[in-house]
Structures are given as C-alpha cells and as structure tokens.
Amino acid sequence: MAKTEFSFDIVSQVSMPEVTNAVDQARREISTRFDFKDTGTSISQDETLIELRSSTEDRLKAAVEVFKEKAVRREISLKAIHFGPIQPAAKGTVKQVLNVNVGISQDKARELVRFIKKTGLKVQAQIQQDQVRVSGKSKDDLQELIRRLTEQDFGIALQFVNFRP
C-alpha cells in the first residue's frame, strides 16, 4: 500500500466585501458623531486602498480608530492592513492611506519557507504565486507546523486552507 502525501496551502486572504462593509460602517459613524462635525473627516475606498482625510491629525487618528474597530468586528485581521504615514494634504488638511494586503509577497513567502525548513519537521514547502504549499507524509507534522506558524508573527494575516490527503 502506497503512503499518502498530505498537503495544505498557506494563504493571506482578506474578504474585500467585508473591508467595504467596514469602510461603509466607519463612514456612517464618522458622519453622525458630534466630535467629527465640521472637521471635514472622510473615508474612501478604491480597490485595496483606503484613504482617510481630516482637518487635524487628532481627528484623523480618531477616524482610523473607528475604522479599526469596524474592521475587527467584521473579523478582518489588522495585520492584513498596512497603515501608511500621516501626510499633509490640500488646504491644510491631513490624510492617511491604508493598504489592504492580499496574498503573500515573494519576500514573505521566502521568509515562511526559511522558517518551515528551520523547524526540522519532515515537510516540503513550495512558493506558488501568492501562497505557499506545504506537503509531507505525516498529518501530525503538518498539524505541528500549523501550530508553530500560528505562534510566530510574520506581520501578515495567515490562513491555512485546502488541507487534504
């Protein structure tokens, strides 16, 4: 009887409809809250970019907190969002751009593969576009690897999908 090979994929996925919902909820809250009245605070989304603008840095930071709260409630990992620097914008306002990271970059994928090799578990890892495929003969080794990967902080949101024999 041939030994079975097990595998799973490491991915970094974000539900863009959930991100859009979080942006919409944050926009609604910002438009109704008294402390944002007459501050010109706004939030807009374009694909994977979210832009927040306000008249002061304090109001901008408060608006970012509102968005973070809505994102967490919608189960969006804040690791999946890169918060850019606060920058001056037109007419004395300030803005901040948030980038939603979808997929695993080549650098992060190489970092994951190096970590997997260092574990000493009998598994193989391959980079496939924006994900990493891990395979091995032992289901226990793969489960142990998932446990170790979740304990480690790679700075991105990781999910483990397609676990199959």
Image (cartoon, rainbow, N blue to C red):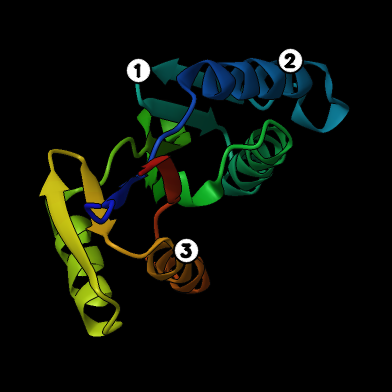
Mark 3 secondary-structure assignment: helix
What residue type is disc 3 on?
Gln
Residue that label 3 marks: 143
Q: Nearer the viewer, mark 1 or mark 3?
A: 3
The number of numbered discs placed on residues in the rendered structure image is 3
Seen in the image, is 35 located left or right of residue 128? right
Calculate the distance from the C-alpha at mark 1 to the C-alpha at mark 3: 34 Å
Residue that label 2 marks: 28
Q: Is residue 72 above or below residue 150?
A: above
Q: Is residue 153 above or below residue 82?
A: below
What residue type is disc 1 on?
Glu
Regarding residue 81, the answer to whether it shows in the image is: no
Mark 2 secondary-structure assignment: helix
Query: Is 133 in front, or is 22?
Result: 133
Residue at image x 21%, y 52%?
2
Q: Are marks 1 and 3 in contact (CB under 8 Å)?
A: no
Q: Nearer the viewer, mark 2 or mark 1?
A: 1
Q: Is residue 108 above or below residue 103?
A: below
Query: Is 113 in front, or is 78?
Result: 113
* Mark 2 neighbour class, 10 Å CA radius: few under 14, some 14 to 19, many 20 or more: few
Calculate the distance from the C-alpha at mark 2 to the C-alpha at mark 1: 19 Å
Quarter of the view holding residue 121 = bottom left
Q: Which mark is residue 89?
A: none
Q: Which sits earlier in the primary sequence, circle 3 or circle 2?
A: 2
Residue that label 1 marks: 47
